[in-house]
Image: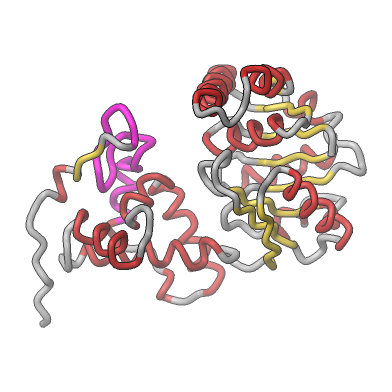
Amino acid sequence: MENITVIGSGTMGNGIAHVFAQNGHKVSLVDISQDALDKAMATIGKNLDRMVAKEKITESDKESTLANIIISTDVVDGSKDADLVVEAATENLEKKLELFRKLDENCKPECILASNTSSISITKIASVTSRPDKVIGMHFMNPVPIMKLVEVIKGYSTSPEVMEIVMETTKKLGKVPVEVNDYPGFIANRILLPMINEAIYSLHEGVAGVEEIDTVMKLGMAHPMGPLQLADFIGLDVCLAIMNVLYDGFGNSKYAACPLLVNMVEAKHLGVKTGNGFYTYGHGTKDLVVADRFKKEAKVKELA
């Protein structure tokens, strides 16, 4: 697993590239947008600077990490030498299937193809390739350089050998891999997203306000971040996409997305990424206030 290709240079992609490069792998970071790649490299540089300032790494470590990363806007060229490809593109099934078809056609036969998807079926992704035994899920947590957990998702045809290789590779990154079978939402999001959705329902029905809901979960359940702030951090569009995967996969009304979540996504109030969700954000995720539309006293919905 010397040569790693990461597809997608957004929050997850640049974090995954950072972690592999910091642990001595040669990384090709691929995105269709040169601007996105430039922004990703700037983000990785800033994150490394913080680590230097906290004396977690040296300046030499920072320079070697950056030297391990090359960038490319060409998927074929950027993945031709890869031993492992980690796809971290948008959470859209059709785009992922198209990408994995292309990777399958152009990557060397022994290359393992992994997806960082948070909910889409690994078995379905693998079905469009000629190497389903070498397709696997690697669901990193955000922020990638800090969070230890990686869900390693075994598709229906993923071979035991590939599972072992990916589990060991993940451990060498200083992460804790957890093997999970391929069912909608896996484990993390099958449990987390319905909780977030229920918090949104509680707001929608007037049970309590934004800060009140988040305070209950932080102080009462020792969560480091309330569910509504976490939804903003994840991205409300991503939350909705995952709820739709759960609903389609299980066919159970308990997984139906709250109408408020649907409306906020339609209105492009997506959380931190747009500066406006359940909270509004200034110059950073710590500079937040409750969004104007939610600044009102919560009233318990009267029973009919």
Indicate left or right for 238 with 206 as reference: right
Looking at the picture, the colour scheme in use is secondary structure
Q: Residue at (49%, 57%) from the top-left corner?
A: 242
Q: Residue at (73%, 34%) from the top-left corner?
A: 23
Nearer to the camera, 299 or 26: 26
Whether residue 112 is visible: yes
Work out which quarter of the rendered image holds the C terminus and state it: bottom left
Q: Residue at (86%, 61%) from the top-left corner?
A: 159
Task: Please state the horizontal and vertical placement of residue 201, each as a whole percent of the image.
Answer: 27, 65
Indicate left or right for 125 with 215 as reference: right
Q: Magenta part of the protein: which range?
A: 261-285
* The quarter of the displayed image where residue 152 is located: bottom right
Indicate left or right for 129 with 23 as reference: right
* The quarter of the displayed image where residue 144 is located: top right
Check the image and name the residue furthest to the right: 109
* The quarter of the displayed image where residue 221 is located: bottom left
Q: Residue at (89%, 58%) from the top-left corner?
A: 161
Task: Please state the horizontal and vertical placement of residue 303, each as a whole percent of the image.
Answer: 12, 81
Magenta span: predominant SS is loop
Whether residue 93 is visible: no
Does the magenta segment cover residue 115? no
Nearer to the camera, 65 or 70: 65
Task: Please state the horizontal and vertical placement of residue 76, each as a whole percent of the image.
Answer: 78, 28
Indicate left or right for 210 with 62 as reference: left
Task: Please state the horizontal and vertical placement of residue 218, each as a whole percent of the image.
Answer: 31, 59
